[in-house]
Amino acid sequence: MLLIASLSGALFLGSWAAIHHGFYNERQIIDTPLYQRYGDWMMQGSIPYQDFAIEYPPGALPAFVLPAIGNSSSAGTPPEPYVVRAAYRRNFEFLMAACGLASIALVAVALRRLGSSTGRAGAALGLLALTPLLIGPVILSRFDLWPVMIALVGLVSILCGLEWAGFFILGLATAVKIFPVVLVPLACVWVWRRLGRRELAACLGIFFVALAACYVPFAIVAPDGVWHSISVQLSRPLQIESLGAASLVALHHLFGLGVSTVSGSGSQNLAGTGSGAIAIVQTVLQGIALIATWVWFARGEADGERLTRAGAAAIVAFVAFGKVLSPQFMIWLSPFVLLVRGRRGQVTAGLLVAALVLTQLWFPYRYWNYAIGFGDWPSAFVLLRDLVLVALFATLLIERPGREQEVPVLQPAATQAGI
């Protein structure tokens, strides 16, 4: 497994290098100038949420400030709004590449813990290493590999029997980006079934301690700024790449439904007939899909294979049915989906590749053609990608027809032991 992981790491670095050349360099849409400004302000002594507004959670701050160490703009000099320094970009990409390599190592540990064969592990890790080529240059200028790595540490810790550490790290991951929180109910079922209610209470306490450690210092200094960062995310409108927005754009092409694009909340959003209602419907569907995933796991055996499968389904549900679906969200999927084994794993891996490639077919090269002009081909690619994500969720969660399903009663370990 060590050799396979090492070779996969080398392949990942080759893929990472390749997306710096050729057509990958065309029409890039990058977020690193924004990250650089945050990093420069922090290096100059400004306090996030108090001295400047920031929409990201506190756990994201290290990903912005670390690349600025040693190369930030001088005090009193306002950071360039749209230009990223070569040193900052290099340091940021180095940090993200390190997170990608760490994710490969963590997936290798998880696959070994799950008892995967050498061939199965090699295929999963090799495909994970090719993610940069499959998704394109968006992976270079977004910090999403940072929360992915931390969430993987939490999941793998739980798989390895280090539940306290796992819950603490999941708390940290949730303070970076919200999506790792969907793994917490699954982890709760795992602990309750295997270790009992007292251990579950301790694990939940540890989770909230980690979350509070990230939020409370800033909430004390700048409560309004912290609340603003949360409310901005919760109140985001229907983003143009979401399933609901792509469906409305399809109706626009087919029947002339009136739609338009409005910029705000850091994205381009859909306005027009039914967009507000669709945003609500998507939020409800997202909640239903997540609850269905948690219940499915709770009604079966709490083993590692089902935990990783449910974890992948929960993250796919969060992405596929959310009212916001930015291209970088696709970065979250690969390491979790590739932990799924068997024939189901082969199908889900194929759907994952299709979703990644379909994303790259329109982002970033044809993004503005879709966002502003609702071009025919980009619109079709976005809708097809979103439908593939729905199929991926269904494949992860739905049992094959005719397969006997065991549905044991959910009992905490403490009850079974007579405690």
Image (cartoon, rainbow, N blue to C red):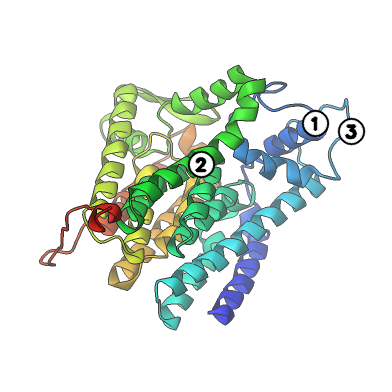
Question: What amino acid is labelled 1 in the image?
Answer: Pro
Give me the residue at 64% from left, 42% from top.
30
Q: Residues within 10 Å of mark 1 (few under 14, many from 20)?
A: many
Q: For the residues carrying marks 2 and 3, which lies nearer the camera in this image?
A: 2
Residue type pointed to by label 2: Thr
Sort mark 2 into few (<14), some (14-19) or many (20+) by Cα contacts within 10 Å.
many
- The reply to whether callout 2 and callout 3 are in contact (CB within 8 Å) is no
Q: Which mark is residue 69?
A: none
Residue 280 x, y percent position in the rendering: 31, 27
Indicate the position of residue 247 as horizontal and vertical percent values: 31, 37
CB contact under 8 Å: marks 3 and 1: no
Whether 68 is drawn above or below 191: the answer is: above
Q: Earlier in the sequence, mark 2 or mark 3?
A: 3
Residue found 41% across the figure and 81% down from its top: 117
Tell me what residue is drawn at x 53 percent, y 57 percent: 153
Q: Which residue is mark 2?
A: 174
Q: Which residue is mark 3?
A: 74
